[in-house]
Amino acid sequence: MSNRRGLLIILSSPSGAGKSTLARRLMQWDEGLSFSVSATTRSPRPGEEHGREYFFLSEEDFKKQVAEGQMLEHAHVFGNFYGSPAGPVRETIESGNDVLFDVDWQGEAQIRNSDLGKHALSIFILPPSITELHRRLVGRGQDSEEVISKRMLKSWDEISHWHSYDYVLVNDDLDATETQLKTIITAERMRREQQPALQTHVNGLQSEFQEMS
Ligand code: ADP
Ligand code: 5GP
């Protein structure tokens, strides 16, 4: 067994608040951090690759995987199904590495209520304002006006779940938010339940103590 148990680090935000940008920065910071590649029934965007951004599945295949219990969590978001495959997550955290999730509030709630919930660390990213959120979605240049309107309409629904998260950050200055995220993760890795080898260490201290007395 590894000295450390990995964390399930969940980042959620309304679309455009900056979670993908922050996730990329965290992955550069710590190469041991792996990203949970979700499965989805939505079509790939230009530049997206099967197995890198998402596993792009037909609705039939997606539902089959859910029925077989292969998803740690799954949800219907913006008219498509999304889900996190459980197998790679279990293996990674068992080996002492953290897994980063970009999932919505439904995913956060399901992971928290799963058998891995005690290893979950959830962080909600808020935008500094709704005007800035819109500006970022337009500035990203990835979505049509229609898709942006749909995402803006959905943003309040996502924001309204902010209070279910362990930490909430306002992503105004990107560098400052990145530093806050790294600080939170560094501290959370020291949580007692993340260190399974502690019991053995304390047993050793006890033996040494008894030998001396
Ligand atoms: P999400 O993954 O939450 O949908 P992205 O990470 O794609 O959001 O960010 C949306 C856009 O906003 C991107 O163009 C990104 O470069 C920009 N962005 C992210 N964080 C900030 C920030 N703190 N200040 C200014 N622009 C930002
Ligand atoms: P997008 O289509 O823009 O990549 O993602 C749309 C939304 O789906 C985002 O809010 C993202 O967090 C969410 N999402 C992506 N993957 C998953 C997943 O596996 N599970 C859940 N519950 N939500 C996901």
Image (cartoon, grey):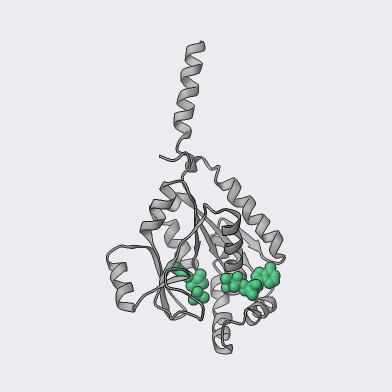
Question: What residue sits 51% from the left and 81% below the top?
Answer: 46
In the drawing, does residue 59 fall left or right of residue 189?
left
Q: Quadrant of residue 38?
A: bottom left
Vertical placement of 105 versus 122: above or below? below
Q: Is residue 95 left or right of residue 127?
A: left
Of 65 and 149, the residue lying toward us: 65
Q: Position of residue 111 (x, y in %)?
A: 43, 59
Q: Position of residue 116 (x, y in %)?
A: 41, 52
Across and down, in percent, residue 81 comes to 40, 75
Q: Seen from this angle, which residue lies furthest top?
A: 213
Along the line of sight, the residue nearer the viewer: 37 or 48: 48
Residue at (67%, 65%) from the top-left corner?
171
Residue plotted at (59% across, 89% down)? 145
Quadrant containing the N terminus is: top left
Vertical relation: 42 (above or below) 146: above
Question: Does 14 appear above or below 98?
Answer: below
